[in-house]
Amino acid sequence: MASAAILVGGRATRYGGLDKSALVVDGRPILTRQLSELATVADDILLVGGPPRVCNVAVCRWVADRVPDTGPLSGLSTALEFARSDVLVLLACDMPFVTAAFLKYLLDLTDAADLVIPRTRRGYHPLCAAYTRRCEPVVRRRLQEGRLALTGLLDELRVWPVETGDLERFGDADRLLTNVNTPTDFSELEASLGHKL
């Protein structure tokens, strides 16, 4: 098994500061959906950042972001520090359609790389990727240097890109990696599911 971390401490400025993990998609909050999938591939799940939370999944615990207001790189650094496993799958809290099978696939590839990351026509997806403990020194140093872009890690780590063809083994790649950044994104997602707001 592995560790997993959901970054729940973002400011969600493009969504008016609302907790995007609480958005209901097809009858269930995104966070509930994610926890359900993660519980089958990880025996250690972290909710990183934001206010303290109680989690209804036995293997889930909340940890404070060690360097608040420095974006997802700090969340990743915190997750790697507190993870009980040497492999960690990292998720943004606004991705409703990730599946256990897909996340397990990412984790299974970590023997061959420091970072296993999806890559589509939209680019790399570092907030739905598998990281190993070998990433920790690089992540920590870049955080200390104020070089906060997650994609900057790609230049310093052994990376295994998971291309669209492989992603589509798990369904439509765009749907699988959908995230909800804005109210418009959420409206479009609801419309795609046939729901009226």
Image (cartoon, rainbow, N blue to C red):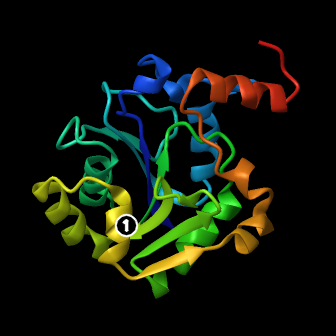
The foreground one among 43 and 72 is 72
Q: Residue furthest left?
A: 144
The foreground one among 15 and 93 is 15
Q: Amino acid at mark 1?
A: Ser
- Tag count: 1
Q: Does 160 appear above or below 45?
A: below
Q: Position of residue 180 (x, y in %)?
A: 59, 34
Q: Position of residue 25 (x, y in %)?
A: 71, 28
Q: Residue furthest right?
A: 194
Q: Can residue 24 be seen in this snapshot?
A: no
Q: Can residue 186 be seen in this snapshot?
A: yes
Q: Residue at x 64, y 51 (%)?
A: 177
Q: Does 39 appear above or below 49?
A: below
Q: Is residue 145 left or right of residue 41?
A: left
Q: Residues within 10 Å of mark 1 (few under 14, many from 20)?
A: some
Q: Is residue 158 left or right of residue 129?
A: left
Which quarter of the figure has residue 142? bottom left
Q: Residue at x 52, y 27 (%)?
A: 20
The foreground one among 83 and 169 is 169
Q: Position of residue 21 (x, y in %)?
A: 52, 30
The residue where tag 1 is placed is 85
Q: Position of residue 149 (x, y in %)?
A: 31, 55
Q: Quadrant of the C terminus?
A: top right
